[in-house]
Every structure is written in structure tokens, then in C-alpha cells.
Image (cartoon, rainbow, N blue to C red):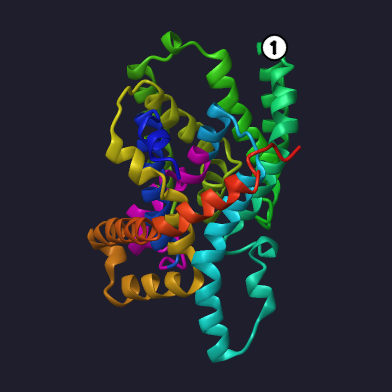
Amino acid sequence: MDLSKIQNRNSSFELLRICAMFIIVLYHMYLYNLPDLRCPEHRVISSLFPLLHVGVPLFILISGYFGIKPTWKGLLTVISVVVVYHVPLLLYHDLRHGLNIHSFLFISDAGFYWFVRVYLFLYITAPILNQALQSMDKKRCLIWILVLSVISVYFGYFDQEGSLSGKTLLNFWLIYSIGYYIHNHVQETQISVPSVLLALLILNMLISITLYYSINNAVVFDSIMRLSFYYNSIGLILNALLIFLLFTKIKITNKVVNYVSSSMFAVYIIHEQPLIRNIISGYVSTNNLVNSGGVLFVAIIVLTGCVFIDKCLQPVWRFRDEFFSKSNLDKPIY
């Protein structure tokens, strides 16, 4: 990994990556320990749940803003991180409890690592999407986004089984296209921080208050969740967009932030590894941290610990990068 490149990145977006991953870690701790969001005991947490779901859309907005330029090295780099952090623990588990080949095929599993699967699909289709977006003027690009929105949001609201809750390539194309549109068709002077903050505040107050007071009304509660929680819901995409716009106005350069942010993908893979996830969830549940501020400290510790593990493996990643470079894998996939 080229540290000079990491240190020269725009730190505002690297800080956004760190914030987004912290939100994802925190969200997962609540997710695996709150079997029923409509339980009155968890009224406050449930009302804030949609805001804890913005992490993934933020990562895709960043990808669209800067553009994905797929190479064989990049593709194999993503896969190698999953293999290093996932396969050894699975081997340990299967040697003790019996071999399960399916558990190694993470790309075929719609549960754990679903993000990796869909992101890889986005990664390998990015050249086609980039070419299409670059051929559009501002008006056509906006129409393209509106068409994708209608299709994706339609499934997000009317799919009663929730099987198409935005964890699809189509929805990732939508969010990626929004990021592209902001970078190429929105002037920085058009973004007003007070206006964005006000919109963000009003949106989340409306969502949270409605969820808080409708927790005993399943029809209203579920409708608001469909409009504000799923990855292809209007409310969630708008929430992520407003947060993203705020970070476009931040101008900072910090080598530490850039260095830490380079491990965010590893944080996702490590803390979502099924065996590790069960340990973390068990600890949170045993100590009843969901109903206290303790879950915040656990999320910080988990994120910090995962970053530490990834940095300890830097010699492995350097060897990998050197091998990929010598193997002439820096060329585009197609």
C-alpha cells in the first residue's frame, strides 16, 4: 500500500469513511440485539434506527463522487482482505464442527458480507456505468437518476417481503449515480451548509418523532420504516445525501485520518465475520449494553481493535501489493 497516496487524500472524505464505518458497527450491535423494534422498551432506539442505517449509502456516494476505475489489482485486493480475515476462522470452526463448503462462498450468501457481494458487482460494472454517465449532460443525468429512483424506491416500498430492500446492484447504481452527479454537475457554491443542516434536522425530527409515537401502531410504524430505513427508501437516501453534502464543504488534510481510513474495509470484514460477530453480540447482550451508553464505547473499541489488527498485517498487504504490481495487474479489467 502506497502510504504517500494515503496521506495526500482529501481528509474530509476519509473522515466520512471513518464516521460511516462507526455508524455501521454501532448499527450492527443494535441490530443483532433488538429482535423487535416495536418493543416499547426500545422506543427511543427504534426512533433513531433509520439514522444508523446511512453508513452503506455514504460509502457508495463516495465511490460515485470519485468514480470507480476497476483493475485486476483492485478486484483481487478486495477479495484478498475477505480471504485473510474470513477463511482462517471458518477453517477453525469447520475443523471442530464439520466442513461446510457453502460458508466459504461468501459471494453467494445473501446474509453476511452481502455488501461485499453487491459492491463487487458494482465494481466490475463500473466501466459501463461510468461511460454511460459521462455521455450524459446534466439534464439527462438527472433523468437517469429519477428513473432509477422510481424503480428502486418502488421495490423498496411495495415489496412486502423486504427481499428487495435495496441490497441490489440496481440500487447501488442509483446511489453511485447521485455521487457522480454531485461531483460533475453541482457547483460547490450551490451547497449551503445552513440549509443542508436545517433540512437534515427537519428530516430526522419528522422520522424520529413519527416512529416514536407510532410504535404501537404496526401499520404506521412499518410504513415509516419503509420510507426511511431500507437502502432504497427515499428517506434514507436523502439522509445520506445531506450528510454527504456537508462533508463536501469540509476542507481538511490529516495524515492520521487518512492512515486510519484505509482500514475501514477491513473493519467491516473483521467485525462482520460470523464467529467474531457472535462474540461481540454475545458480550453486548450479556451485559445489557443496548439500553445504555455502553454500546457506544464497545463500538469504539471494536472499530479501534479492527484497525489495529489490520495495521499489524501491513507487511502482508505490502507483499500482496508488490506481488500484484510485479504481475502487471494494474491494468483495467476491461
Q: Position of residue 26 (x, y in %)?
A: 37, 55
Callout count? 1
Instruction: Indicate whether residue 267 is drawn in magenta.
Output: no
Q: Horizontally, is 65 left or right of 110 in the view?
A: left
- Residue at horizontal 41%, vertical 44%? 20
- Residue at horizontal 46%, vertical 68%? 35
Q: Which residues are magenta?
A: 33-59
Between residue 276 and residue 41, name the one nearer to us: 276
Q: Kindly identify the amino acid type of the residue bearing the numbered disc 1.
A: Asp
Q: Position of residue 172 (x, y in %)?
A: 63, 40
Q: Quadrant of the C terminus?
A: top right
Q: Quadrant of residue 3?
A: top left
Q: Position of residue 138 (x, y in %)?
A: 65, 12
Q: Horizontally, is 287 left or right of 199 in the view?
A: left
From what the image shows, is residue 221 above or below residue 4?
below
Q: Is residue 115 visible?
A: no
From what the image shows, is residue 177 above or below residue 23?
above
